[in-house]
Image (spheres, rainbow, N blue to C red):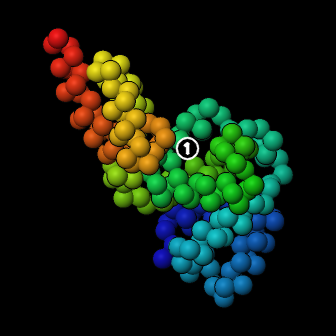
Amino acid sequence: MVSKKQIAFIRKLQESSPERENEVHAFLKSIEAVSIDDLQQQDASRLIDRLLNIKTEGSDNDRGPTGKQISFLESLMRDEPRRKEAERQMKSLGVKNLNGLTLDQASELIEVLKSLKVESSREDRLVSEKQKKFIASLIERSNGKAITGDFLSKLGKKSIDEITSAEASRLIDVLKPLAELRKQK
């Protein structure tokens, strides 16, 4: 079933322009639904995509996203399901990256990603900035560039930016004793 957040977001989009209002009615008719409350989650996502593709008058469609919006979107996109949804949304908008969004599109994408229920685990989340900084300091202190390269190669990853939080923890577990050993010498 459709979530309460999806319903609220659809209503917000619906109220923003007559074109979006008409699209909601046309969509409901096309799937033979009486109201938004009757939608399944997949249908609600499809409707949201359609509504987001309709530009509204008087909106900030030409301004790019703020730094805060990009930062928040990046933090939301650390979870694999949200990252995939964001990529899908951006593709449907014809945008290659977050900076290509308009201010309004960024706001709407934030709402879509926040509405997704994500059972986040360390296996799904990308490495955090804090972990990246700690790994960099451990590499320097342990002279562990080659070990890190081998670790990434075994995972099929090209850089620290591509690993998950759990993988980062495993790398830290490898590098930390080496750094401590070098410190004692």
Q: What is the secondary structure assignment of the residue under circle 1?
A: helix
Going by the numbered disc 1, the residue's amino acid type is Leu
What residue is at 32 percent from the left and 21 percent from the top? 143
Give above or below for 171 relative to 18.
above
Give the quarter of the image for residue 9: bottom right
Mark 1 Cα-neighbour bin, 10 Å: few <14, some 14–19, many ≥20 = many
Residue 20, x across and y down, in percent: 76, 65
Residue 128 visible, this orientation: no
Q: Nearer the viewer, residue 34 or 101?
A: 101
Question: On the image, numbered disc 1 is attached to which residue?
Answer: 73
* Quarter location, residue 29: bottom right
Residue 119 percent location from the top left of the image: 36, 58
Q: Quadrant of residue 144?
A: top left
Q: Position of residue 116 (x, y in %)?
A: 48, 60
What x and y, as percent, mark residue 130?
A: 38, 29
Which one is nearer the viewer's eye here, 50 or 16?
50
Quadrant, the C terminus: top left
Please indicate, yes or no, whether residue 159 appears anywhere in the rendered image. Answer: yes
The residue positioned farthest toward the right in the image shown: 57
- 92 vs 6, left or right, is right
Q: Residue at x 33, y 44 (%)?
A: 167
Looking at the image, the residue that sits furthest to the left is 184
The residue sitting at 62% across, 60% down in the picture is 88
Which residue sits at x=65%, y=65%?
48
Q: Residue furthest bottom?
A: 32
In screen coordinates, is 7 left or right of 48?
left
Is 128 situated above or below 135? below
